[in-house]
Amino acid sequence: MLIIDCHAHIYSPDEHRYPPKDQPLRVPGGNASIDDLRRTSTTHGVTAVRAVQTVSFYGYDNRYVCDATKTHPNWVSGVCTLDPDDPHSPGLMDQYVREFGIRTLRSIPGDNRRTFDHPEVRRLWRTCAELGATIDLFLMNPKWVAGAEKLLKEFPDVIVGFDHCMDLKPGPEYEKTLNEVLRLSKYRNVYAKVDFISTGTEIGFPGDDLHEAALKIIGTYGPERCVWGSNFPNRLWTPKMTYAEHLRIFTHELPLAEEARAQILGETARRLWFPQL
């Protein structure tokens, strides 16, 4: 079965060549480079990965994810993150796509992270549409939904990955958040990253407290619009669950038909980001 990791962060051990921002969020123990990701992913049968810019470590300096993407085009699809409030960002997006093979923008709200309904965010989405790039939507706050919907209506032909399904987790906001995630399935260009079990579970493996949410999302979007991601490096982003455990949830623990597993674990991502596989 083809397995593609659709959400992994990478950190270079060379902090002279790729300097971190002030007060970066560090990975406990390190060992989170593109080479470390390659070893971890291949050990678990993963063929390709989407490397996502690590804003909490590098800010908007995308040099490491760009270089990793250009160096490993056969198995890496790069996801950059740009500041929508910086007027240079659309030009940088164009450069990253053309020179480094970046395929995706991770879109965050503009106006100091207040709203997606912002002219500079639109400029970036329009740039992606013109370049044939896709978007990962960092929609993590219910207050941002209305603005995000305006863009989804305006750009119906741009492929949009839904980061972490609004960071679903057990708690007082669970039902409200899940209902919003399900409602957004009406935008047919939106693809759900069902990777929130490892980030949101309160109990660890096998994450039973979020299985129902995952199954509802898969049932509503359809497995052909859902993808799996590891959230590597797991020591930092999923301390209650390892890479292997999160993958096993989707290979064994969730009661899915084999065709559905194949779509979520690899076939959907292949169609969207790895047509060469």
Image (cartoon, rainbow, N blue to C red):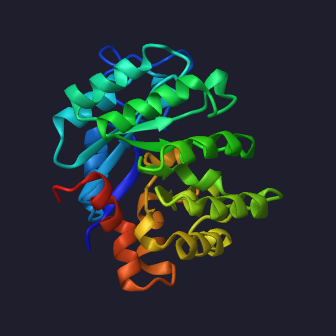
Q: Is residue 223 left or right of residue 148?
A: left
Q: Quadrant of the N terminus?
A: bottom left
Against 270, residue 208 (above or below) is below
The residue at the point 47 percent across, 83 percent down is 256
The residue at the point 18 percent across, 42 percent down is 73
Q: Is residue 107 left or right of residue 93?
A: right
Against 200, residue 135 (above or below) is above
Q: Quadrant of residue 120?
A: top right
Q: Position of residue 70 (x, y in %)?
A: 19, 33
Q: Position of residue 55 (x, y in %)?
A: 50, 29
Q: Is residue 178 left or right of residue 95?
A: right
Against 26, residue 78 (above or below) is below
The residue at the point 49 percent across, 61 percent down is 188
Viewer-proximal residue, 118 or 181? 118
Viewer-proximal residue, 157 or 39? 157
Q: Quadrant of the C terminus?
A: bottom left
Query: Would residue 126 be seen by someone viewing this image from the given angle?
Result: yes
